[in-house]
Image (cartoon, helix red, strand yellow):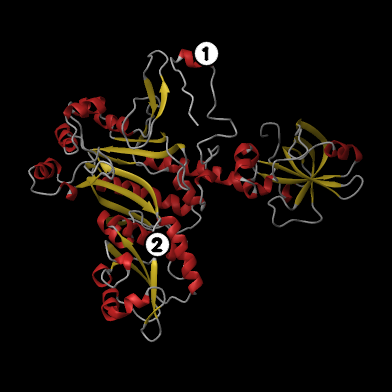
Amino acid sequence: MMQSRTHTCGELRIENVGAQVTIVGWMENLREVGANLGFVVLRDFYGTTQVVIETEDMMKIVKDLNKESTISVTGTVRERSSKNPKQATGDIEVVPEKITVLGRCRYNELPFEINHSREADEAARLKYRYLDLRNPEVKKNIILRCNVIAALRQAMTEHGFMEITTPILTASSPEGARDYLVPARKHPGKFYALPQAPQQFKQLLMTAGFDRYFQIAPCFRDEDARGDRSPGEFYQLDMEMAFASQEDVFSVCEDVLPPIFAKYGTYDRASGAPFTRIPYTEAMEKYGTDKPDLRIDLTVQDATDVLSDCGFEPFKEGLVKAVVISDFKESRKFIDKTLADVEVQAGNKGYWFRIDENGEVVGGISKFVAPNKEAVISKLGLKSGDLVVLSAGKKTAAQKTAGVIVKTFGAAVPGHMDKEQYAFCWIVDFPMYEIGEESGELEFCHNPFSMPSGGLETLLKAERGEIDPLAITADQYDLVVNGIELSSGAVRNHDPEIMVKAFEMVRLGEYDVKAKFPAMYNAFCYGAPPHAGIAPGVDRMVMLLAGEDSIREIIPFPMNKNAQDIMMGAPSEVTEHQLEELHIKTVPVEE
């Protein structure tokens, strides 16, 4: 017996023939084939069962109902004369003796057909998400999410990690994205912030003497949506290890993640340990991105020395990058369309030429390349049938465009992408500092909490002018799978002296460190262990496993691209009384 039923709608089989049963669920459909003969499809969380209507009394009950009403059916199981091999319960049907209406659907028309909700407008799907989730195809992603999270918890526990929850209301911290602020009623003019990540708390746990921590952590960032990023909130498998190095973190991730990807993924192949390791500068040079998709066999080459003075105006300043695509058989129309896609994604144009069957340079910008044909062919290792796609500009723009060329042509040209797998890699040796685009001065490149490679001595050398600060790397790493950044992590800077010196490099002193990170700075002064961690994104992980292109497909109740919950009406206005309690006044926005 399960709740108000004896069986679920996905449970009955041929061996149940003759049994008296009660099933409950939503009336998915009624198909009438005679005055008192019809077939009801009853659906619950577990599946569907056919209920055959053969009497006037039973027909009167179901004809009076709109689709998606919830009912209870008590009756006898019998073998179907016309079986449905595509349905798990397709060998049987239930002949009802009693039908009870449990929850009447009061609308004649639904916003969309439940089983075709994925074809509906996204705004309608989000507004009526509770209906959208009735679609088994939509529901299966949420079930997958539950199973993956359960598997992650089990694996982390088996590896000796303790699940510890950290605060949701905390202090605002400069971690890169905008905070969500919460006014403090008892402290006028002051605000809590929702955590962008449990970063400081998990480091404090290490300082407190906990050895291995994890949680499925909610994180809140006021940033714009993307296909692989939900606005507002997201979840990550947050973990930290005391007395640990980069190798310890890699070992755990390489042990925990591949079996889960292989078991639950759309593709049953996943990289095994050890994952490929690529230094950041090599990734940018070879793939044009720090998020390379290793399923694609295309790479980037530098062609500046053989093409910068060829007379083609876009090549005259900056760098020229080339992507060689072997045995290319597609049309000129294909090239133009794919290059248009590149320009949309990169915000920069790509150019091309080909090597024909006679070894001649043809098409695209060939008239500029041909005079220096031999040098170009030698430099790029070209042969007949090769297509060369090029980018140009300042270093960052040329690399980014080349990266988009690799991704776009790699996916579009047959034979260059082994799609049905999960290809992991580590990006390592990130630069500690960069020159800020707006400030023009030295700034932290990524995570200010990362330990600089070489520790204090490296920072002192930079301070003395013995090395370029831009040459300092951090013990920081990204985990990338199929061209998507799954996680960032680092060996933490646990030494107050090194931390202060790292901040001094960006014109912040000990006072600033104490002011911005008081708890962590003070805790480290009481003796902190070396520690390291990482936080793979759960939402992105499930999106990859489900084979979805949009992260909203694997979140139970997602916001839209404008960070609105149109089902609940959030964000919403509040009353003047609520604002007064919080000592807040709103200012009208000028049109």
Label 2 to label 1, Cα distance in Å?
A: 55 Å
Q: Is residue 208 visible?
A: no
Along the line of sight, which residue is nearer the eye, 50 or 15? 50
Q: Residue at x 26, y 59 (%)?
A: 282
On screen, residue 413 versus residue 82, left or right, reads left
Whether label 2 touches label 1, CB < 8 Å: no
As shown in the figure, which amino acid type bears the numbered disc 1? Answer: His
**Label 2 belongs to which residue?**
349
Along the line of sight, which residue is nearer the eye, 413 or 311? 311
Which quadrant would residue 388 be assigned to in this image?
bottom left
Secondary structure, mark 1, is: helix
Which quadrant would residue 99 be assigned to in this image?
top right
Secondary structure, mark 2, is: loop
Which quadrant would residue 529 be assigned to in this image?
top left
Q: Residue 219: percent from the left, percent from the top?
A: 41, 34
**Label 1 belongs to which residue?**
577
On screen, residue 133 versus residue 515, left or right, reads right
Label 2 neighbourhood size at 10 Å, few (<14), some (14-19), many (20+)?
Answer: many
Q: Residue at x 25, y 29 (%)?
A: 209
Q: Residue at x 27, y 29 (%)?
A: 204
Image quadrant occupied by the N terminus = top right
Total tally of numbered discs in the picture: 2
As shown in the figure, which amino acid type bears the numbered disc 2? Answer: Lys
Q: Nearer the viewer, mark 2 or mark 1?
A: 2
Q: Residue 549: percent from the left, percent from the top?
A: 51, 52
